Structures are given as C-alpha cells and as structure tokens.
Image (spheres, rainbow, N blue to C red):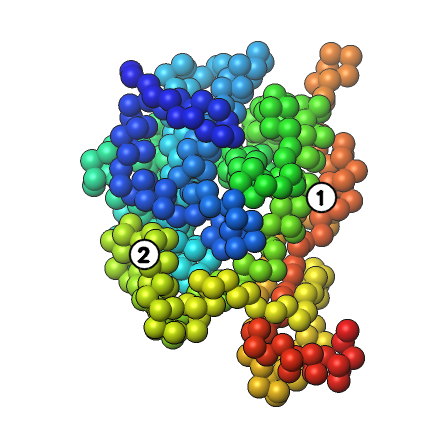
Amino acid sequence: MQTYEIRDPIHGTIIVDEEERLVLDHPWVQRLRHIRQLGFVSMVYPGAVHDRFQHSVGVMHLSGKMFDHLCACSDCFLLDIANEDRIYAKKLLRFAGLLHDIGHAPFSHTSEAYFPNKDKLKLPDTWYRQGYEITDGQASHEDMTLALIAGLVDEGVMEASFAQDVAAVLSRSIHRSERLQKLGPLASILRTLVSGELDADRGDYLLRDSHFTGVTYGVYDLDRLIACLSIVEGPDGPELGLDLHGVHPLEGLLLARYHMFLQVYFHKTPPAFEYYLSKAIEEGEIELSLERGIEDVVAMRDDYIISQLHKASDQGLPWSRRILHREPAKLVLRERLGAEQQENFLADELIGALRNEGCHVFTRQSHQVFTKIAGAGAIERGDRLLCERRVLGRKLIDNVTEHSALLASFNEPIDLRHTYILREDADKARAVMDRLQLW
C-alpha cells in the first residue's frame, strides 16, 4: 500500500497510508485546519494559532507509536494475538486518534453551548450498548464526534463495522463488533491509549501547545515514557501499565499538564474573551446556529465567526469591538476554591457591591483534576494504573502510587473562579474595593 509523509514540528516525519489519507482528505477532517486548538489563548500567547488538524494527526501518530512499542515487548500478551488482528487493532487505534476531536466547533467552549438536541444527530441506534442508548438532551462534542464518524460511512470513506469499532474505542457507550469483541482485553487497552492517564491525546497536546505558545511548562520526556509502557496482569486481565522506571516520566507528564493548566489553559485573559463572544451571540451581534446538527457543524470554521465579528465591529457593536480591539476585561478577584469549598462569600459580597455601583460584572470558573489515578491523594476509587518491577527475576505488580510520593500525597483539583469587570468600569470598581478594604 502506498504511503505518504507529513512533516510535523513535534514528532518529525509522520507516515500515513492510502486508507488514512482518504479520511484525512475528507472535508470534514480538513475542516479542523480552520479551527484553532486553543481558541482565545492566542490573545495572550500569539504563537498559539495551531489547529486541531495538526493535533489530530499527532495523536494518530503517537497512538500508533505506543502500540508498536507494546507489540515489541518480548513477554507481552499481544504476541499471542494473530498478526492480522494486531494490524486491525493498530489501524483502529490510529483512526480513533485521528478522529477523536472531529466533533469540535470553533471556539469550542463557547460554541458547544449552542449544539442541538441529540435527536438531530441521527446516530445509528444499533451502535449503542444496552443501557447507553441515545437519550434526550443537548449534544456534546463527544456526541458530535460519534455522529460524524457514522456520517463518514454514508460519505463512502469508511466501512460501517470498522467505523463502529473506531467509535467503540472512543466511547464506552458503543457496542463493539464481533471481531473487536474477540480481541478481549486488547479493546480496553486501545481505549486507554486514546483516553486515559497515559493517552496519546494529552501526550501530544502538552508538547504541541507548549511549542506553539513558546513556553516550556508542557515539556516532558515522551520517549522515555513510551519506552516504559507495558502490559501488566491486572485483577481483571491484561491492562496498560508501566515499568517501574516509568514512574518519574509519568510524574513529569502530570506535572507538565498541571503547570500548563495553571499558566496557559486557565490564564485569566482568555475566559473574558470567551464571555465577550457568548454575549455577541446572545445579543445578536453575530449569528451562530448549529441547530441542524452535522450539516451546520461541518460548515462552521473560525473564519466564519471572525468575519462576522469584523462586520459587527465595523457597525460599532460593543462585544465584537472588544474582541477585535483586544480589550481584555479587568480582573478584580481570582479565587482558588478548595475541593470542598464551592462558595465564597467574599466574592458574592464584592459582586453585589460592584453591581450596585452599575458595574458590568461577570465570573468564569475553571476546573481540572490533576489526575484520576486511584490512590493519588484523596482519590480512593479512580483509574487503576499498575506498575511492574522485578526482584530477583520475579515480577511484582503494585499500584503506581506506591512508588511515587508525588502521586500518593498530592491531587488537589485546580478550581479557579475569576471575577471581572469591563475596562470602563475600573474607576467605580476601585472605589468599591477601597470601601470594602479588599486590596
């Protein structure tokens, strides 16, 4: 089969085959070239204009690289699986990596609020496991991803049972085909490689986002981490784990993620611009309609929204003007809420006082868990991650937290609430904060 090369700034040369290229070149996937990975983060880090297409190709490549390493392990249970089944599994995994973000719309945190009801997506009823059938409610980008994968079957670029298996790797709600079921625990390992504590998704976005933002917070030892991946024998059968030497690279990955959230993803400036965009939509400055489902989503790109913002700004409309003229809101309070403290009466008092003075006040909250590994800090029941070590030639398997003081002792969620006022209200806000003695 003919292959093609893609040059990537993070992973070097990425090889794709003819089947992958057929899907890569489909307009629904090419659309991701026109959706920025980090939305308004470029208002702070100008280099952060990379797109979801780059990331998706990176995840496809990285997931396949991880799988190849596991297959090369001399004592891995994968060696007992027929070669044609291993080829099928790797193919599934790479396509799952490629398509995992296909359901995102531009400025995803804002636009997802306008996604249609799930019944507009026409998802195949036969795909769903019993108890996971489609229910009423607003669709998420994960629902949209499954709908678009199903749509690629109708578009003639994916075979139906294969597309269903790709969806099954991405979602527990999807029923596996008979062929994937026969692979037993391998199917769960594939899912973990796309979405788990050691997944190719975060493995790519941390390095990529760090590179394009121009910071070093997201850098970790990817090669060493992959070299330490292993299949270990868990209580329910084979599962993805680590060699003991991978504990420190894992800590590096998790700390990189932690610092990227604090310094980049949860920076104080982008949430205010997300609020401006939501107000521009809400007040009719720009039109964002996704009610038809797939048809609207595949037609939506960043440039569509940006062109509307320019038209609205030229007409003097305020929210669009604030975005295009880069007029960030003024932060008056940044709180780090505790895991058990979800109310802050000081903030409530301040917000009430500011509103009484006629200030336009709004808040944005950001929440992220450091890790979901069982045994990490206060987490008792989470995602099991096992670690394999050898003593006098005998294999011993433990929870990874038993070999990491960092993981065992720390897992405080990042839970931030930012309170903003518009720039024109700054003098009023200073007077209020003087009166309340909040400096």
Position in image of residue 397 (x %, y %): 69, 26
Q: Secondary structure at mark 1?
A: loop
Say which residue appears at 59% left-offset and 79% top-offset: 425
Q: Residue at x 67, y 54 (%)?
A: 413
Q: CA distance from mark 2 to mark 1?
A: 43 Å
| 183 relative to 377 in the view: left or right | left
- Percent x, y of residue 252: 68, 35
Q: Nearer the viewer, residue 57 or 404?
A: 57
Residue under the point 73% across and 40% down: 407
175 on left or right of 78: left
Which amino acid lies under the numbered mark 1 shown in the image of this protein? Ala
The location of residue 25, given as percent across then percent down, is 28, 34
Quadrant of the image for the N terminus? top left
User: Which mark is first along the chain, 1 or 2?
Assistant: 2
Q: Nearer the viewer, residue 273 or 126?
A: 273
Front-lying residue, 184 or 430: 430
What residue does disc 1 label? 376
Q: Identify the residue position indicated by label 2 in the image.
A: 304
Residue 88 seen from this side? no
The C terminus: image quadrant = bottom right
Q: Nearer the viewer, residue 264 or 191?
A: 264
Where residue 88 sits in the image (x, y, percent)? Answer: 37, 23
**Does 302 appear above or below 392?**
below
Amino acid carrying mark 2 in the image:
Tyr
Label 2's element? helix
Instruction: Kindly give the residue lying farthest to the bottom in the view shown.
Output: 356
- Classify residue 182 by image quadrant: top left
